[in-house]
Amino acid sequence: MTSSDNNILSRWPTDRLLLWLLRGTAAIAGSIVLLIVLFLVLDALPALQHIGIARFFTDPSWHPAEHFYNLTPMLWGTLFATIGAVLVATPLGILSAVFCQYYAPPALGRLYRKLIELLAGIPSVVYGFWGLVVLVPLIGAIHPPGPSLLAGIVILTIMILPTIALMADASLASIPPQYLRGAAALGLPRWATIRGVVFPAAKSGLFTGVILGTGRAIGETMAILMVCGNVVQAPQSLFDPVRTLTANIALEMAYALGNHRAALFVSGLFLMGMIAALVGAADRISREKIYA
């Protein structure tokens, strides 16, 4: 904010009050994030000191009772489940929003939004229960055992689809009508307009929806815990049971003590690092697109 802006604000007490209120809320939000990171670091510090960071990748397995703390299989499980869900949910969400905005009748479009909003409001445990009762037996009939990486990908896809679809729908709805009228004046067909005009104009919102969906997929716990089998192993196929970092924390935190408990906080640090890397990559990609 420039000095001239501050001079203008100084003339209006209400604006100055609003300015300090916004600064205070921003400081509170930033402080909460920093306190969470500090809490994770302090509780993970005993494991980092007594076990060392290398053993979380080189130990034979994850057996805290035998002093083995390898997190690599659960890292792979988390990454595979998240990437698989994002790869499926992203085109489904964006294309469904395109259909809703540019192809569907208005009544059908409104009904679609209501259904997607309803889907977004369903608790994760309900998704997990449905997956456990319906999806897992279906996959087991095709390829035993049933609880698997594939079940986790399907559940996560359904869970993050509303986030991506609603963000895409809002982004497409915010496209200035002049863009569409200009494309129509040039004689562009509908799909060429969407591909060449709408997508570039809405790319920021579309990308934000994908980032939010990815963040939810990384942090999901209950549904994944119920359908993935919770076997600590690096999956060799879609039908292998896996355990994610979040599921491991939820399963073992209740009885973990000492280095075992601290190692679970190291898992939390890894998750925080994945989210931070995701946000950093998103910020960098956004800047490259802006200055391209």
Image (spheres, helix red, strand yellow):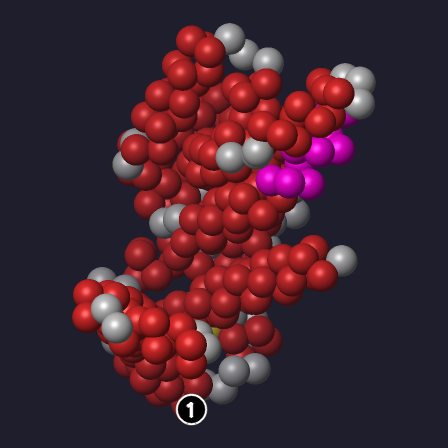
User: Is 8 placed above or below 109 here?
Assistant: below
Q: Residue at x 28, y 36 (%)?
A: 123
Residue 74 colored magenta?
no
The residue indicated by pointer 1 is: 49
Q: Specify whether 213 is left or right of 221.
A: right
Q: Secondary structure at mark 1?
A: helix
Is residue 199 highlighted in magenta? yes
| Tally of marks | 1
Q: Is residue 271 above or below residue 101?
A: below
- Residue type highlighted by circle 1: Gln
* Nearer to us in this view, 289 or 123: 289
Q: Is residue 67 left or right of residue 99?
A: left
Q: Name the residue: 42% across, 9% down.
A: 107
Q: Position of residue 270 (x, y in %)?
A: 48, 69
**Residue 35 seen in render:** yes
Range of magenta residues: 192-202
